[in-house]
């Protein structure tokens, strides 16, 4: 779980005898060199504040916060918007894996793992791209709960994997060490046999599934 600024108008050289400029009865500047500069300063400040407001509104569109509704192991809803966690791929809800020679619902357990990471904590999601490569999924987003990166958390638990580069969902290189540790310590999916989520969606299954 991203200034703008402006420049004041140059000093205006006016003689002490210069008359005020009037338009429709409105005096735009008093006598002396400071009147117009003060007016330009006010106008510049107004433009500056408007620009800041625009940046703030634009940022608000791409970043949302609130309690999360967990769809599956790498998809969640926050403030009515759906997001796919950037840099990971988790088993589909219907997917089964194998442990100690028995099949189990690894997709459901991946969903439960993401529920655990977000339980009772406000989630902040910042969109990094409009759509995920998979049809029908939400925008790719970097989400955190309590300041903790949820993508990294899911890889740490072993219930999500780093997708291949061709999947269009690039993972940070830092995730490599996290995934290697999860595999070494046999956490999550690494406790048994599984088909990677991207291969499972392509139709590959474990023998006997």
Image (spheres, rainbow, N blue to C red):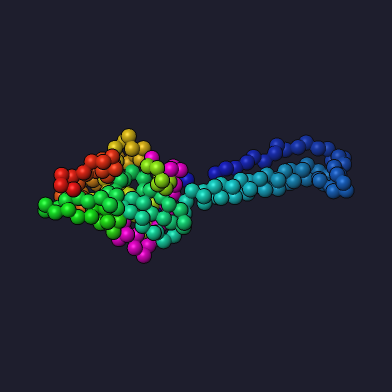
The residue positioned 76% from the left and 37% from the top of the image is 12
Residue at 41% in and 55% down: 77
Query: Residue 110: x and y, percent?
Result: 27, 54
Check if residue 134 falls in the magenta segment. Answer: no
Residue occupying image coordinates x 86% and y 44%: 22
In front of the other: 27 or 56:
56
Q: Tell me the quarter of the picture where residue 203 sits.
A: top left
Across and down, in percent, residue 181 comes to 20, 47
Q: Is residue 177 visible?
A: no
Q: Is residue 47 left or right of residue 167?
A: right
- Magenta-drawn segment: 114-133
Position of 57 relative to 16 (above/below): below
Picture quadrant of residue 177: top left
Pick the front one: 192 or 36: 192
Q: Position of residue 57 (x, y in %)?
A: 56, 50
- Foreground pick, 202 / 160: 202
In the rendered image, the residue lying farthest to the top is 166
Residue lying furthest bottom in this view?
120
Q: Position of residue 159 (x, y in %)?
A: 25, 51
Q: Residue at x 52, y 51 (%)?
A: 60
Is residue 42 shown to the viewer in this render?
Answer: yes
For residue 208, above or below residue 123 = above
Residue at the extreme left: 100
């Amino acid at each position: 779980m991203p200034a703008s600024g402006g420049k004041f108008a140059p000093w205006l050289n006016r003689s002490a005898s210069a008359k005020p400029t009037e338009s429709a009865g409105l005096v735009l500047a008093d006598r002396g060199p400071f009147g117009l500069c003060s007016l330009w300063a006010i106008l510049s400040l107004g433009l500056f504040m408007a620009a800041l407001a625009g940046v703030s509104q634009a940022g608000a569109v791409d970043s949302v916060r609130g309690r999360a509704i967990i769809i599956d192991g790498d998809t969640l809803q926050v403030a009515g918007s759906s997001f796919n966690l950037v840099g990971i791929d988790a088993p589909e809800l219907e997917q089964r894996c194998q442990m100690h020679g028995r099949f189990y619902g690894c997709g459901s357990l991946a969903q439960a793992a993401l529920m655990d990471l977000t339980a009772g904590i406000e989630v902040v999601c910042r969109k990094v791209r409009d759509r995920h490569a998979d049809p029908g999924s939400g925008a790719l987003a970097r989400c955190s709960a309590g300041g903790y990166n949820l993508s990294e958390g899911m890889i740490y638990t072993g219930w999500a994997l780093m997708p291949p580069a061709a999947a269009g969902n690039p993972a940070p290189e830092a995730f490599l060490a996290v995934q290697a540790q999860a595999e070494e310590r046999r956490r999550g999916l690494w406790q048994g046999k599984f088909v990677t989520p991207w291969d499972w969606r392509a139709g590959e299954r474990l023998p006997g599934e």
